[in-house]
Image (cartoon, rainbow, N blue to C red):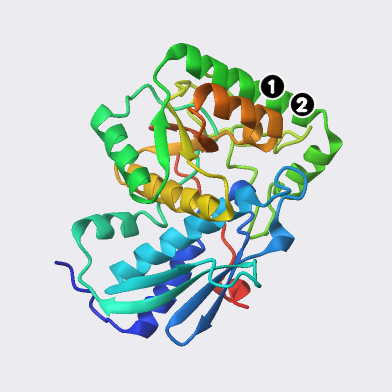
Amino acid sequence: MNRPASRSPKTAVEAAVEAARWAPSVHNTQPWTFAVTGEEISLRADAERKLRVSDAQGREMLISCGAALFTMRTAMRAAGYEPVVRVMPDPDRPALLAVVKVGPETDPDEGVSVLAAEIERRRTHRAGFTSLPVPDRLVEALVRSAQAEGARLTPVLKPDAVTVLAALTQAAQGVQAQDRRFGLEVIRWARPPGSRRADGVPADAYPRDPVRTEPHFAQRDYAWRHRWGSDDGDPGATATGVVAVLTTPGDTREDWLAAGQSLQRVLLHASAYGVSAAFHTQVLEMTHLREFLREELCSGEYPQMIMRLGITFDDKDVVRRPVQDLLG
């Protein structure tokens, strides 16, 4: 067992809040705030950071917050305490998503330590992958990781199904690109070169000249008519990677939080083996296309995330708001 060197409820709370800010979020909006009361942390959704056009219901916001919740749980365990979690504890306060309290002392096992070590190392990828394969055994382990948090991760193995997902993504991106409301929303979270903002997508987080994968999964146009983007990418990294869909049996706010926790567990597990994820949520932001996907490819379950998993040697810096900006 790996006993933390300086164990106390106070350090566990501090570690959990510090870790949570590294969780992934749609457009890096970081739509969360935290309130600390003694040995208890309240996780709240920050509605000011919700995508009002593409995420009117707040589904992606809650998935992002679910990722932060799993990160807090992992960090608290790594600090030597079992977290006690209450999800949606007060129906009269819908912004209060969860309360995490320091529970009994525990010795973090190797699995917890491995996940915790990846919290700050995990990166979102926005391009093609190298031709190095993702091992089948790892994919199977990622499926189990998602299941442990209440969601289902389904690798899309049939080429025809991958082609359908790619086509739906291209169609959704094409429609959104023609809609000024979607465009303005993306621009809000696109950071120009040299920006000092601590949120949003930096200009060097995606390639200036994207290389098409086959089949091609459309990326967001964060540059929006500018020559933003990085020239540091590998032009030979054109592999699609392993396409996977994360689903839940229901589509409630609790399901969205569970999807976020499952997603982060999968991402940290993958990161420990050098595997990154690229996300494609455009199709899930269009109600009729999401419903088509649910009925035709997801066996009636609700798709919460579409991703590609693969190996890349890019290691971009990430931006996160300081802890003091998250406490309220």
The kind of secondary structure element at disc 1 is helix
Residue 61 falls left or right of residue 13: right
- Count numbered badges in the picture: 2
10 Å crowding of disc 2: few (<14), some (14-19), many (20+)? some
Of residues 291 and 100, which is closer to you in this image?
291
- Residue type at tag 1: Ala
- Residue under label 1: 171
- Residue type at tag 2: Val
- Residue 118 appears in the figure: yes
- Residue 271 appears in the figure: no
Residue 252 falls left or right of residue 276: right
Report x, y in % for residue 239: 44, 21
Q: Give the farthest residue toward the right.
A: 180
- Residue under label 2: 175
Report x, y in % for residue 38: 46, 87
The kind of secondary structure element at disc 2 is helix
Compared with 122, 131 (above or below) is above
Q: Decide: marks 2, 1 in contact (CB < 8 A)?
A: yes
**Residue positioned 32% across, 29% down in the render:** 134
**Residue positioned 48% across, 12% down in the render:** 160
Of residues 253 and 206, which is closer to you in this image?
253
10 Å crowding of disc 1: few (<14), some (14-19), many (20+)? some
Compared with 183, 103 (above or below) is below
Q: Quadrant of the N terminus?
A: bottom left
Q: Give the farthest residue toward the left.
A: 1
Q: Quadrant of the C terminus?
A: bottom right
Compared with 191, 322 (above or below) is below
Of residues 6 and 232, which is closer to you in this image?
6
Of residues 212 and 103, which is closer to you in this image?
103
